[in-house]
């Protein structure tokens, strides 16, 4: 079943960043919406991997990182597959974005989301079937 929105890693990270101010508030609100409306928001294995790495790099414990990743894993999660990787390569070429951003776009498309909540791509730009939305602007 398609979801409405796909959350990029930075949204999740800001929710746990005590120094992020307004961005933290917005991120926490978006995550709360995702919990209150199951099936509306998706993430990917890549997002979970990036969250774990950056959460621990910023001082979070590995135990806490594993627990939070476990919690987020209850949402719809798009797996890394060869087909997704190939789509990401095609999107990278089409949109001239980094390989990491292309894989996020591919996962967002695979989830059926019409919105990708991120600050890493051009706010408002439509990438195929997915519109990038920067929730922090």
Image (cartoon, helix red, strand yellow):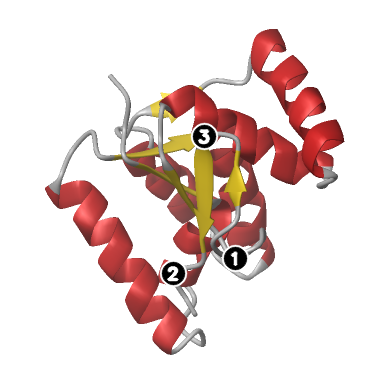
Q: Nearer the viewer, residue 61 or 9?
A: 9
Mark 3 vs mark 1, foreground winner is 3
Q: Residues within 10 Å of mark 2 (few under 14, many from 20)?
A: some
Mark 2 touches mark 3? (CB < 8 Å): no
Task: Judge by depth and name the residue closer to the eye, 101 or 65.
Answer: 101
- The image quadrant of residue 112 is top left
Circle 1 SS class: loop
**Disc 2 to disc 3, C-alpha distance:** 19 Å
Relative to 15, is 59 on the left or the right? right
Image quadrant where one finds the N terminus: top left
Identify the mark nearer the N-term, 1 or 2.
Answer: 1
Residue at 49% over, 51% down: 65
Helix, strand or loop at label 2? It is loop
Give the residue drawn at x 44%, y 89%. Answer: 21
Q: Is residue 97 visible?
A: yes
Label 3: which secondary element: loop
User: As displayed, is residue 3 above or below residue 79?
Assistant: below
Q: Of the numbered discs in the image, which one, if any, rests on residue 119?
A: 1
Q: Dot 1: few (<14), some (14–19), or many (≥20) neighbours within 10 Å?
A: some
| Residue 120 sits above or below residue 79 on the image | below
* Gap in angstroms between the C-alphas marked 3 and 1: 18 Å
Task: Locate residue 117, reporting x and y percent.
Answer: 47, 56
């Amino acid at each position: 079943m398609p979801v409405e929105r796909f959350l990029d890693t930075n949204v999740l990270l800001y929710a746990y960043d005590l120094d992020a101010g307004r961005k933290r508030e917005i991120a926490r609100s978006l995550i709360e919406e995702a919990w209150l409306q199951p099936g509306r928001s998706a993430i990917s294995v890549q997002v979970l991997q990036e969250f774990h790495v950056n959460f621990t790099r910023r001082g979070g414990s590995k135990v806490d990182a594993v627990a939070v990743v476990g919690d987020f894993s209850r949402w719809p999660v798009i797996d890394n597959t060869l087909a997704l990787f190939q789509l990401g390569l095609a999107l990278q070429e089409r949109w001239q974005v980094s390989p990491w951003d292309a894989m996020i776009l591919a996962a967002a498309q695979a989830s059926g989301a019409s919105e990708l909540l991120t600050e890493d791509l051009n706010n408002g730009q439509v990438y195929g079937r997915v519109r990038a939305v920067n929730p922090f602007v």
